[in-house]
Image (cartoon, rainbow, N blue to C red):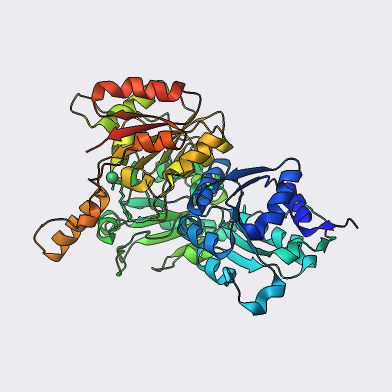
Amino acid sequence: MTERWGKNALLEQLQADGLTTMFGNPGTVEQGLLDAVEQHSGFDYVLALQETVAVGIADGYARATAGPALVQLHTGVGLGNGIGMLYQAMRGHSPLVVIAGEAGVRYDAMDSQMATDLVAMARPVTKYATRVTHPDSLLRVMRRAVKTAMTEPRGPVFVALPMDVLDAVNTEQATPSTIPSRAVQPVEAELDRAVAALRGARNPIILMGDGVSVSGAQRELTRVAEALGAPVWGLDNSELNMDTRHPLHRGQLGHMFGAVSRKVVADADAVLIVGTYTFPEVFPELANPFAAHAKIVHVDLDDYEIAKNFPVDVALVADPKATLAAFADRLGAPAEPAAAPMWTPPALTAESPLIEHLSAALAATAGDDLVLFDEALTASPGLLSHLPPHVPGNYFLTRGGSLGIGIPGAIGAKIARPDATVVGVTGDGGSMYTIQALWTAARYGVAAKFVICNNQRYQLLDLNIEQYWRDSGIASHTHPSGFDLTGPDISFVDLAKGLGVEALRVDRPEQVEPAVRKMLDHDGPFLIDLETV
Ligand SMILES: Cc1ncc(C[n+]2csc(CCOP(=O)(O)OP(=O)(O)O)c2C)c(N)n1
Ligand SMILES: [Mg+2]
């Protein structure tokens, strides 16, 4: 039996699981662990200056690798700062393995400085939250945490690590965590029932989400859509689940108002829901929006999400890839989807918004290895106008409704995929939640690129309140002053430079192309402050 300190055993365990990059922000109760990280070969510590940033970078890294990512936070105060970003990681099923230090189990009864119930804090924003209380179960608990994070449906996990547990002698053996396969296909009779419900529908529709991309089922989904002739809508859809240029791809249902989704699904006589819940909106319809005679088939690995709000006819807890392939075969779909989708970019004129010019310039300059981290919000349609997402793994949309992922997410993606061109696009509002992430990019030479869509306002809030006024019969009037970001001007160029990142302001169409070229040619992180007023 090998004897070493718990903190060293922990690093061996993390290494066995390939978790050798630690995104974090330290404090005194993690000093022993960080000391060990420095001395243990093969570990990288990536310092973030605020915990939201650490979680955001890890989230981008996990999304770009489709694997787990390790986050170290500083006890309750650090975990508290990370909670909002952890919420979006949980909604997005990111397998983040979050650890936080604590003074020690021996101090439990003292209720002294920094003491708090970390597990209770973490529980609502994680799939599993626990605390190691005995040195003999440190690695056992870590393996359970990694397994839980990585088992579909995936999600963030949290482990509190008291210092006296890490400083005790540990004799456990480090060994890779077991990740159960959930590549399960329903039995024949269930497949037949599902296909019978869908086949022959006159007005079928498909509602898809990220369960498709997690399972790598894009091709199978397209085969089924083509066989049924069903339009496909994205719901909990933040990655590339279907080529957005495909003629059957209809786009994204909004995340705000259930009335919008109701209109889309009301006339369908067959609905295939796959890899999403219904409906991921802030103000969803309370009444069942599906037609009474509609046949509903729901395929997901997350049993909790199936029939969560409305009954379905055929409910299959199953892997989308295997199941959709079986559907497609039964429906007689060819093995491959039809020929490459036809798509032509919209015309660009001097009057087009600058974000469309930027989209066109990026499309002309960057290749298919362009990875977009899209937190552009109201500028997102313009951003995608010449860059319709179509490569699996190269498009990441913000999720969970929590702002601030644009810059750190792009940094995490670039750390994960150093050879790709990674561009994070965010707003003047969204960027300011995590702007200090630029410092981390500069410090580690992470050559991600950033675009701030600067309209000097929280425009989405302006649009939403106008909708609220319309729905409530309230006459339009002055918007709340809290939606307005004019004065003082935020100088993103100065901010970026102050944090070590080169930057340019762009406010005229003719500046866009040279600025994009300069950004992509620059061999480090680079920021464009783009006027989008
Ligand atoms: C952490 C967090 N705080 C506040 C909000 C509320 N919120 C939603 S959209 C928005 C405005 C975003 O502004 P910006 O990023 O500039 O994009 P724009 O709406 O102007 O396109 C705000 C504040 C949120 N979603 N998340
Ligand atoms: Mg804005």
In front of the other: 461 or 493: 493
Residue 494 on image: x %, y % = 36, 35
Task: Using the image, determine if residue 312 lies above or below residue 247.
Answer: below
Q: What residue is at 44 percent from the left and 42 percent from the top?
A: 407
- Residue 264 image point, x, y percent: 28, 54
Which picture quadrant has residue 153? bottom right
Residue closer to the observer: 471 or 174: 174
Tell which of 399 and 293 is nearer to you.
399
Q: Quadrant of the N terminus?
A: bottom right
Q: Is residue 28 left or right of residue 209?
A: right
- Looking at the image, the residue that sits furthest to the bottom is 109
Say which quarter of the image contains residue 104: bottom right
Observer able to see residue 384 = no
Left or right for 437, reference 140: left
The residue lying at 48 percent from left, 36 percent from top is 394
> What is the quadrant of the C terminus in the image?
top left
Out of 297 and 285, give the one closest to the viewer. Answer: 285
Q: Position of residue 260 (x, y in %)?
A: 26, 56
Mark count: 0
Farthest residue, direction left? 475
Where is residue 368? Give x, y as percent.
47, 27
- When the figure is inspected, residue 258 is found, relative to residue 46, above or below; the finding is below
